[in-house]
Image: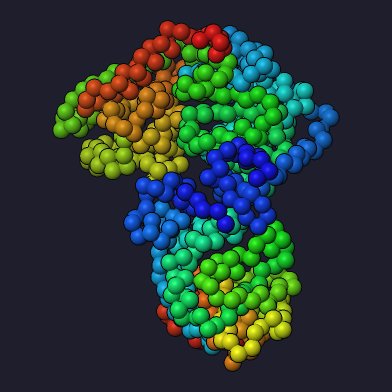
Amino acid sequence: MQTTQRCLLCQVKLNDTQSLIQYIVKDCLCAVCRRSLKIKRKTIQIHDLKLTGFYEYDAFFSDCLIQYKECMDEALQDMFLSEVKDWIFLHYYHCVFLCAPSSEEALAKRGFHHVKKMFEQCGIPIVECFKKIEDVNQKTGSLSKRKEIAKSMIVDETMIPKGKKLILIDDIATTGSTLLAMQELLGKDRVKEALCTAIHPKLLSDFDKRRIHRRIY
Amino acid sequence: MEQNRCPRCGNTDIDLFYQGSKGWYCRACIKFSRVLLSETRQENWDDYPADLDSEYRLNFELTDHQKIISRQICKQMKEKDVLVWAVTGAGKTELCMEFIQQCLNQKKRVAIVIARRQVVLELAERFQQAFQCKVIPVCEGYTRDIDGDLLIMTAHQCYRFFEKKFDHIIVDEPDAFPYDGNPVLQGIVRNSCKGTMLYLSATPDSKLLENCHVLQLFSRPHGYNLPVPVSVYCLPVFSYFYVFCWVLNRVKQGIPFLIFVPTIKDAHRMTVFLKCRFNVKCCTSKTKDKDGIITKMKQKKISGMICTTILERGVTFEGIDVCVWNADHLTFSSASLIQIAGRVGRKASRPDGDCLFLCFSRSRKVDESIQMINYANNTKMSIMSSETQ
């Protein structure tokens, strides 16, 4: 990967626009963009899955994610999680990350696995054992949809290393359906924790109102 | 790197190229989705309809000046990019209709690029009335159907056509935000065109004047001169009182008015001050019901409006007077002051009107804009190319 002298988001020259700490850690964003990307680590329990998100899901974060995923801007891979990668390594160095699946079509179009690329910098082994066999609309988190998502993916057990703690990873948890479906495929006893870059405010508010536990499935 | 130029926006700055899994791509125009530098595919347009009635029809006749410029556009566009430098309200849209008709006759693809979405929709309607062919607006909310004989779109939408390419592109108001000073948008528009381009502007920059054949039209269809602004210098503390008296005069005579202020904060302050005595509304980029307020103004349900530069172009109110408060402020360039002055006297029913530049200090921009309007009033029409300048 090449180094860049410009901010990855606003493309201003980095020399005069970074703080001293950013300069020392060789941050790829300018001070303004870095400030706009707000860290807000939140951990919630969705049924049997402990889910941790690291950033606040606001308009700025959403725009960054769209640029990364939809506009296929691979350069942004190191921008996410760069401030929390050491924290992730310290907490999960003994684990294996299991990557949320991406459809074959999207993968071929992008040329890279967006979730894997995001978490690669943390230094934890990542396994792509899940595969999507059909695309399902994940906008709703109802029981029927969740079951559909579980049906739409398969898991390759041979790829999962034995004797390591398994952690699920995804880019964003909107309803948690994908992560719950992945947990269901592997078995609830084997996977109890998941990480994502951000948790959607809707899911957080559901959790805050304690509606999440009342969801019938 | 296969080539060091973006096929879509034309960027050549290597700092803005990145090598991803699929190869090098340009990050300058990444907001329009990834384009690999190696992508040089050229798609063809669908077959052109054989029997196309391309003749345009207007409800009025063009003036002699307009006819001359219109013919010159058709002639000069064969050789080089053309800039039509016409005053506000000179009928720039009608000037390019003959050229469009010629392109459609020759089965050439032509597009009109405009800065603002609202103007795209308005202009599409006007062109559809003038032409029998299929006129398609392409802007936010209108992107499903992009296959027509004449496309009218915002500059951002040009990214869809860098593979197909138009024979000619007409850029309306290249000096307006967001096209002005945005090399990515300018590159995308340039790369969507394989032939020459036509620029329509009232306030062109020096770059355009250098690189194009320039056709000047400084008279409005009604034949009257542009109202020359009057600059008044006063202390800020007295400026509110001056504006109050100016508004009182307009209200007594029943003349609608616009007061331009440099910032949103100033707009709110001025509105609070005037609202206690007059029926006025405020219109800024933050105002929710902009269209509703503009309609009320057009229907003369309110006496006047206080606005920021958001209304400096693209809006026509009949028989209004204009005041620019703090005209020497950084927000107002000489181009924007000319545009603001151009709101006055657009209709034949009241071809004159007052334009007041209220300044707190002497400003070169204000002087330049007044000089430019005087120059336009003295020139009327001329045809020149970059070689003769």
- List x then y, in percent, for residue B106: 77, 23
Image position of B32 (left or right of A15) = right
For the residue pair A22 and B389, the one nearer the viewer reads as A22
- List x then y, in percent, for residue B326: 26, 30
- List x then y, in percent, for residue B345: 41, 19
Q: Based on the displayed image, in which of its 4 quarters is residue B248 positioned?
A: top left
Q: Based on the displayed image, in which of its 4 quarters is residue B53 positioned?
A: top right
The answer to whether any part of residue A36 appears in the image is no
Looking at the image, which residue is at 64% across and 18% down?
Answer: B80
For the residue pair A142 and B331, the one nearer the viewer reads as B331
Looking at the image, which residue is at 51% across and 18% down?
Answer: B209
For the residue pair B141 and A110, the one nearer the viewer reads as A110
Image position of A66 (left or right of B244) = right
Looking at the image, which residue is at 51% across and 71% down?
Answer: A122
Residue located farthest toward the bottom when viewing the structure as drawn: A189
Colour convention? rainbow
Task: Say if B299 sits above or below B199 in the image.
Answer: below
Image position of B11 (left or right of B328) = right
The answer to whether any part of residue B157 appears in the image is yes
Task: Say if A54 sits above or below B343 in the image.
Answer: below
- List x then y, in percent, for residue B112: 62, 31
Residue located farthest toward the right when viewing the structure as drawn: B50
Q: Based on the displayed image, in which of its 4 quarters is residue A208 positioned?
A: bottom left
For the residue pair B227 and B256, the one nearer the viewer reads as B227
Q: Quadrant of the C terminus of chain A?
A: bottom right
Task: Say if B376 sits above or below A82 in the image.
Answer: above
